[in-house]
Image (tube, grey):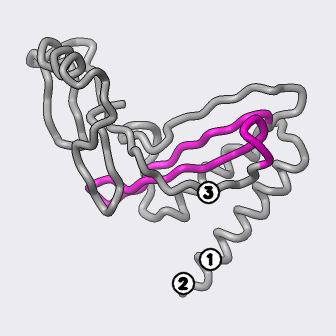
Amino acid sequence: MGKIYGNFKDGIFYHCAAIDKDFTSEEWYKYCDDTRYSDAIVATYFGFQWNAHDVCRNPHVLDVLNVSYNDHLQIKTAQRKDGLWVVGYDYCNIEVGSDACGGGGSGCWYDGETFSTEDKAIIAQLEYFKGKNLKSKYKDAINKAIFDRKCKQLTLF
């Protein structure tokens, strides 16, 4: 989601990076009421479509392991208008002793670090998961995905 300013700096409540527009709180609430929190696309860069909440609606999706809806790990990437890449994930039932599901930063403009290439973004996200108490099938799938991405980078030279 775009940046919300808690201190209302210069009367600005929300900044939509996708269209580089500042909203006062009244303007933002009116926008949300008028669009009914629509996922309407407000900008497209490099083929990636962004809504006013600065979320990419059509990220690239890498299925690291997709057993079922309740058993999967996906890495999602999108390229911003400045050419940098952002990364996020969706997961379900990947850790030992847990059936938790969730996600993070699935192509959000402001979430976390940015990367110069899509491969670097994917590798960084996969490395993050290596530090978790993962089920062995996910450890194996992540190691394979990292190996494949690094090999892909080497063939580019």
Q: Pointers 3 and 1 in contact (CB under 8 A)?
A: no
Residue underneath mark 2: 156
Position of 49 relative to 96 (above/below): below
User: What main secondary structure does the magenta stretch of the protein show?
Assistant: strand
Mark whose residue sits in front, 2 or 3: 3
CA distance for labels 3 and 1: 15 Å
Q: Which residues are magenta?
A: 67-93
Against 98, residue 123 (above or below) is below
Q: Is residue 85 magenta?
A: yes
Label 1 amino acid?
A: Lys
Residue at image mark 3: 62
Residue at numbered disc 1: 152
Q: Please tell me whether mark 3 sits on a helix, a strand or a loop.
A: strand
Number of other residues with Cα within 10 Å of mark 1, as a class: few under 14, some 14 to 19, many 20 or more: few
Give percent across and percent down for residue 32.
24, 20
Between marks 3 and 1 in the image, the one whose residue lies nearer the viewer: 3
